[in-house]
Image: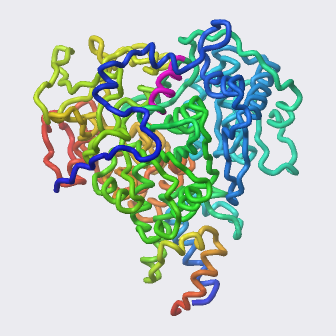
Amino acid sequence: MSYHRISKKPASTIAPNLHDYDEYRAHFSWDQARASLDGLPDGKGLNIAYEAVDRHVNALRGHHTAIRWLDNQGHAHDYSYAELKKRTNQFANALRSLGIGKRDRVFVLAPRVPELYITALGTLKNTSVFSPLFSAFGPEPIQMRMDIGAAKVLVTTTRLYQRKIQALRDKLPSLQHVILIREDESADLVADTHDFDELTQAVPDTFEIPPTDPEDMALLHFTSGTTGKPKGAVHVHKAVMMHNMTARLALDLHLEDVFWCTADPGWVTGTSYGIIAPLTIGATMIIDYAEFDAERWYNIIQDQRVSVWYTAPTAVRMMMKAGEEVISRYDTSSLRFMASVGEPLNPEAVVWSESAFGLPFHDNWWQSETGGIMISNYAAMDIKPGSMGRPLPGIEAAVVKRLKDGGIKMIETPNTPGELALKTGWPSMFRGYLGEEARYQKCFVDDWYLSDDLVSCDEEGYFWFIGRADDLIKSSGHLIGPFEVESALIEHPAVAEAGVIGVPDAISGEIVKAFIVPNAGFQAEGSLKKQILGHARKKLGVAVAPRDIEFRKNLPKTRSGKIMRRLLKARELGLPEGDTSTLETDE
Amino acid sequence: MNRDQIKSVVLSELYSIAPELEDEDIAPDTAFRDQFDFDSMDFLNFVIGLHETLKIDIPEPDYPKLLSLNGCVAYLESKDLPG
């Protein structure tokens, strides 16, 4: 089925920042993007937190609301830019008082509470490195990531600490300080930890950001690999150029906007666009503590007068399920622009949103490695439902084919599938996988970054997502590495072998499904399935653990004993099996 | 169905989604997602499980009533389910 192109009419109220895609692109320069930022005073460099917070106070906008946080009951708590400056100064001073400095890694594992945001920005002010963990990770993914990142500080809540960290402390040799956010202020302090409030209130609320080289490491985002450990993608302070530019051009953010990014900062979108990007614009950012609930969300849009909204396909599909009628009971007229990221937004959802909200969702594409939006639909550019749009000004994207000799060949014929490649050199490109130079180098051929995403590009330069080139699973917009899941599964005494794939799901895009060969002496039955499922959820956390388990007598393997996930998937989905010449043992 | 029967169905559906909760004390008035790792997908699967086991329709606007154990029991009691 084909979908009608959604044409854009000239804006009646606020003119889009990117008014004419082709013209803007033709005249774009990175200097122009840099000119939207201030840089540290006296030419001391470029610091993300200065651009996000302090410069607005210096520009006499300190009274403007930076963060409006909605607690679990939906009550609003406001933080002005001036207040945010003080609180982040205190956190930076607190880190300094603990002897934490440049390049030291500060991890956070927390639900969406204000302290998380203060930690992120205060860490950047101190030129330490901020690394977010998703609060629904289990102990194994947490330990693995903190180990790779050599975490020196962890900021978390009392509850998460007691459930997930306390038992791990011995296995985290680099960890020097744990700072606890106390949800229940009457609760006792926990041994070997600091109290967030006590620590930050004992230090001054003024702080001078040290000189920051634009190439200084700022953010560490973990992403999954098909094999081996997760990878820590390193980003530098210069990435703020891209955060700011994409907020203006791809999300059409203006100074007076009320912006709501629903992504959790535990994932890259929630940091780049749920903390940094909107603040560099000087807009007001909504943060909701609670998880998805259709009516709660529409209430937030109505009561907070949200004007720009950035969410994910899984949420959009859940809203579609709840139906248009619910939306009609709320006043969503404050919305001016809506965008979506995480996985391709299906064309039905784009068309539905136009009918339900009177505005279409604008899909865009990027990855942890790219640091910011790379390909996007724009306020003033027609949408072809199902397409991720066109590359940002300054970004050169191509469709390529990998050659056997290790090189690549450009695919020039429109609508021909190939791998999405980006010309290197944009400011928020990752600067490495921490401690894994070889793995980093493998991402590049000549001066192109290869994304592992299969796409095609049409005659007008719109890109269309086709699938992943590897075995990674995209569930609710989160990238999950099958290897990490399989490793945790085989730790269970009943599991001899495990093969993990993504299977299509109407709501979350894909769900994680495990095929398991039980050890001798274990019965492949429902009670064992529950035991293994419980084990995986405890170890990995709900964001990573399988949702479904199926027992098998054998798994298809190559001669070297590698499980052929591709074959498991083809069989599960009833697709052609493709090349099976490397198959040694079958099911 | 009486209250105890309903509670046992609710717990059985909950444990089929999140078996690790069998070892946990459940605070009956606190939302599942506020005391355990229980995300939106888990919740959706849990509601679908109740729907399939009890053969009742649970309209989307009623979902917020099912967030906690006591919430579920009260909601299902009001449905006057056959024993």
Of residues B21 and B71, the one drawn nearer to the viewer in this rendering: B71
Q: Is residue A12 above or below residue A276?
A: below
Is A170 colored magenta in this rendering? no
In magenta, the rendered stretch is A238-247
Q: Say how the picture is coloured.
A: rainbow
Query: On the rendered structure, is A131 left or right of A152?
Result: left
Q: Residue at x 47, y 76 (%)?
A: B59
Of residues A163 and B38, the one drawn nearer to the viewer in this rendering: B38
**Figure quadrant of residue B64:** bottom right
Q: Is residue A404 above or below residue A475?
A: above
Query: Could you tell me residue A116's position as x and y percent?
Result: 67, 38
Query: Could you tell me residue A474's position as x and y percent?
Result: 38, 44
Q: Residue at x 49, y 52 (%)?
A: A335
Q: Residue at x 57, y 35 (%)?
A: A255
Q: Work out whether residue A376 can be spotted.
A: yes
Name the magenta segment's main secondary structure. Answer: helix
Q: Residue furthest left?
A: A413
Q: Residue at x 45, y 79 (%)?
A: B53
Q: How many marks?
A: 0
Q: Is residue A79 above or below residue A230?
A: below
Query: Could you tell me residue A271's position as x and y percent?
Result: 55, 34
Query: On the rendered structure, is A418 left or right of A243?
Result: left
Q: Work out whether residue A166 can be spotted.
A: no
Q: Residue furthest top?
A: A43
**Figure quadrant of residue A226:** top left
Query: Could you tell me residue A61's position as x and y percent?
Result: 69, 31
State the quadrant of the N terminus of chain A: bottom left
Q: Is residue A556 above or below residue A433?
A: below
